[in-house]
Structures are given as structure tokens and as C-alpha cells.
Image (spheres, rainbow, N blue to C red):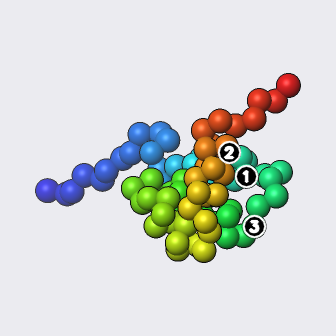
């Protein structure tokens, strides 16, 4: 008996998910004057929701309070475009 191949539904391909999710945070970060460390820390927050702001801030050498403020300003309360 031959093994059956696993077929994933449309949109569940890992490359498709990666492309779709990577565009969201990058679009939000465009146009903001951020340092490399701040940008890296914000992307780390987006990718690793199970880690705390303190862990991520320490890893990237960013102040935890500043990182948390950036996160809430950019991702939770994005500016309204008129």
C-alpha cells in the first residue's frame, strides 16, 4: 500500500503564510524614524508573542518602557490616515 501525500488547503503553504505575515509589520514600520535595534526588537515582539517585552528589550539593547510604547503606538493604535 502506497502512503498518501498530505495536501494542504489553499493558503496553508508555509511560504505563503511567511510572505503574508512578513508584509504586515514591515508596512507598519515604514515611514517611522527607528533605530536598527528598535526595528529588530519590534519585529521580534511581533514574531515571538510568548516572550516578554523585558526579554526582547534586553536581547536588543533597548529600554523596555520605550519598546512597549513603540509597540502600542505602532501596532495596537496605528495612526488614522485621513
What mark, if any, has residue 57 been given in the picture? none
> Between 15 and 36, which is closer to the camera in this rendering?
36
> Between 1 and 80, which is closer to the camera in this rendering?
80
What mark, if any, has residue 74 been given in the picture? 2
SS of the residue under disc 3 = loop
SS of the residue under disc 2 = helix
- For disc 3, the neighbor class at 10 Å (few under 14, some 14 to 19, many from 20) is few
Residue 80: % across, % down: 77, 29
Residue 2: % across, % down: 19, 57
Query: Badges 1 and 3: C-beta atoms under 8 Å apart?
Result: no
> Between 37 and 63, which is closer to the camera in this rendering?
63
| Sequence-first disc among 2 and 1 | 1
| Sequence-first disc among 3 and 2 | 3
**Residue with the mark numbered 1:** 29
- For disc 2, the neighbor class at 10 Å (few under 14, some 14 to 19, many from 20) is some
Rendered view: 59 above or below 68: below
Q: Quadrant of the N terminus?
A: bottom left
Q: Quadrant of the C terminus?
A: top right
Query: Badges 3 and 2: C-beta atoms under 8 Å apart?
Result: no
| Sequence-first disc among 1 and 3 | 1
Query: Badges 2 and 1: C-beta atoms under 8 Å apart?
Result: yes
Res 3 seen here: yes
Quarter assignment of residue 65: bottom right
Residue at the image point whose x is 60% and y is 38% from the top: 76
Res 25 seen here: no
Measured in 3D between alpha carbons, the distance from the residue under mark 2 to the one under mark 1, in whole angstroms, is 7 Å
**Residue with the mark numbered 3:** 35
Measured in 3D between alpha carbons, the distance from the residue under mark 3 to the one under mark 2, in whole angstroms, is 15 Å
Measured in 3D between alpha carbons, the distance from the residue under mark 1 to the one under mark 3, in whole angstroms, is 11 Å
Q: Is residue 12 left or right of residue 41?
A: left
Residue 53: % across, % down: 50, 59
Amino acid at each position: 500500500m502506497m502512503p498518501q501525500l498530505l495536501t494542504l488547503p489553499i493558503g496553508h503553504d508555509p511560504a505563503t503564510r511567511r510572505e503574508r505575515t512578513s508584509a504586515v509589520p514591515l508596512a507598519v514600520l515604514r515611514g517611522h524614524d527607528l533605530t536598527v535595534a528598535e526595528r529588530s526588537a519590534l519585529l521580534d515582539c511581533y514574531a515571538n508573542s510568548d516572550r516578554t517585552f523585558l526579554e526582547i528589550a534586553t536581547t536588543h539593547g533597548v529600554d523596555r518602557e520605550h519598546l512597549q510604547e513603540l509597540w502600542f503606538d505602532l501596532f495596537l493604535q496605528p495612526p488614522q490616515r485621513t
